[in-house]
Image: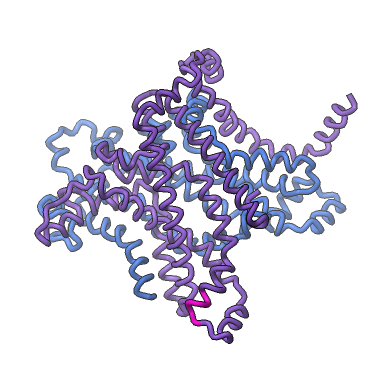
Amino acid sequence: MKRIRKFGKNLYDNRVWLLMVLPGLIWLIVLKYIPMFGQIIAFKDFRFHPDGFFASVFHSEWVGFENFQFLFSTNDAYIITRNTLLYNIGFIVIGLILAVAVAIILSEITKQRLAKIYQTGMLFPHFLSWVVVSYFVFAFLSTDRGLFNSVLEFFGADPVSWYNEPGYWPYFIMGISQWKGVGFSSIVYLAAIVGIERTYYEAAMIDGANKWQQIKHVTIPMIMPLIVILTILNIGSIFSADFGLFYQIPRDSGPLYSVTNVIDTYVYRGLMTMGDIGMSTAAGLYQATVGFILILLTNYIVRKIDEENALF
Amino acid sequence: MHILLGTFAFLCVFPFIYVIIISLSNEASLAENGYQLIPEEWSFEAYAYLWQMRAQIAKAYGVTIAVTVLGTIISVAIIALYAYAISRRQFIYRKQFTFIAFFTMLFSGGMVPFYIVMTQFLDLKNSIWALILPMAVNAFYIIIMRTFFMRTVPEAILESARIDGASEWRIFLTIVLPLSIPGIATIALFSTLAYWNDWFNALLFIDDPSLVPLQSLLMRIESNMDFIQQNSMLTNQNSSILNSIPQDSARMAMVVIATLPIALSYPFFQKYFIRGLTIGGVKD
């Protein structure tokens, strides 16, 4: 009784703050936590019920792990897992190298005006939607009109039906992803590099370090904590893919599914085109669970190595 | 070094220039020679054609602008309030509410349950709210704003305002918000960009042609140019006329029209964008 009264008093004393978090709280509950609870339909044979969402969930029949069995009995599960993981590992590694490299080069450019122009150019793709980018790509890859085939023709080679040839797409996807993202991700590193005290470099120069040695022994160690934390964040989402990149850019082309289908596009197609709600949810839950475990695991490892750099 | 960066920067902008060139090419020469860097014949026919379609395009622009403005305002308001509350030591449940937001970054409900909640529970199919609500709150921004509030709003100022008898709401509106304009502007900018470029929620929830935003319109004309006609005045045109329309250049002209506002305005807010990105770390 006393505790309840104390709780009531606490609520009352904090009413201003509670009122402030209320809109956000409602949003989080409805659009984040109810869907989390909704994941249980992965264990059900989902049937729409006229009385709305909760009725649908409660009235659908339990089927245990059947949806998962279906999912993992097909080849799809392997393909989407492989694609999602390999692409993301590629994005993280190559993205990190490029972003840090670009940031270091930008910081070394003494002509501020030129550096600004370069940065403006490199940041441009970030402001475009994937739909727009898909048209850009189409201008290059269109079979009968694209620039690539025009160039091939010019050199006497046969035109390639790019949207039917899966072999090239891992490189395209990787390249387009970096094209869109490098300018943006280098900003944070650039800010960190600019923030490094000049005296470190002066000391290094007195010790006879050349540019490359300065970068290796001053710049990189100084931005290491930032690299670690951004990489953890990326590893946390290693199991989810940028839907637009994998859906818009290949123009939903069937022959390319083997190299462009990722968990997100698979879930979308399962829901919208095949109407297989159970299996789609199972794939989504698989994605969310493995992603969750990966974040915890990475954070745990980082914590063991260096408490300072851990996310939580 | 200059050559390296210069080339990359050029490659980043080049496709857009290329698309502008295609949109200004004569359709017949496109059919014959493909997309050229320097077209045989320049032509404004694509834009003239889109001008006929202005009703539908204007509608899509209207939807996009409405969603972007409304969405950004709602989004900034909710995020700022939530983040401010959990940044104050007086709020004894701040840890719990921080966790409630933070946890959504770790574990997600997935697309299917989200879709069912939106359509069945909230009944938002073919509603403009289906374009606004899904992106209204972002846990990551809440955490960033919380850090920002903790760093830039010193407790001492608030304390003296409290002694003068100001209410928490008044303090928030007249002291905290003006102090936090850089942080708020950042969130607003990110949010504006996200709303402007969103097509995914339209893909999931919008069938009604009068609610299709710009990006989504662009997506739909990918396969058939006549989608754009569906709801415009020229519905009864027959297909022989449809065949003569500048399909390819008109598509690219649509891309240009949808991209131009961003392309023109972004160099101006790039400065704030960069500053925002570098505001503190994620951690406190």
Indicate the quadrant where residue B73 lies.
Answer: top right
Q: What shade has chain B been given?
A: blue
For the point 56% across and 57% down, the residue is: A228
Indicate the quadrant where residue B7 lies.
Answer: bottom left
Residue A271 in percent (x, y) is at 40, 27
Q: Main secondary structure of the magenta part?
A: helix
* Quadrant location of the N terminus of chain B in the rendered image: bottom left
* Quadrant location of the C terminus of chain B in the rendered image: bottom right
Taking the image as shown, residue A227 lies to the left or right of residue A268, namely right
Taking the image as shown, residue A282 lies to the left or right of residue B97, namely left
For the point 35% across and 28% down, the residue is: A74
Indicate the quadrant where residue A119 lies.
Answer: bottom left
Against B112, residue A85 (above or below) is: below
The chain that appears purple in the image is: A
For the point 57% across and 37% down, the residue is: B107
Residue range in magenta is: A210-215
Pick whichever, B70 or A225, lies toward us.
Answer: A225
Pick whichever, B236 or A19, lies toward us.
Answer: A19
User: Number of numbered discs present?
Assistant: 0
Residue A12 in percent (x, y) is at 82, 34
Query: What residue occupies the far right of the structure in this picture?
Result: A2
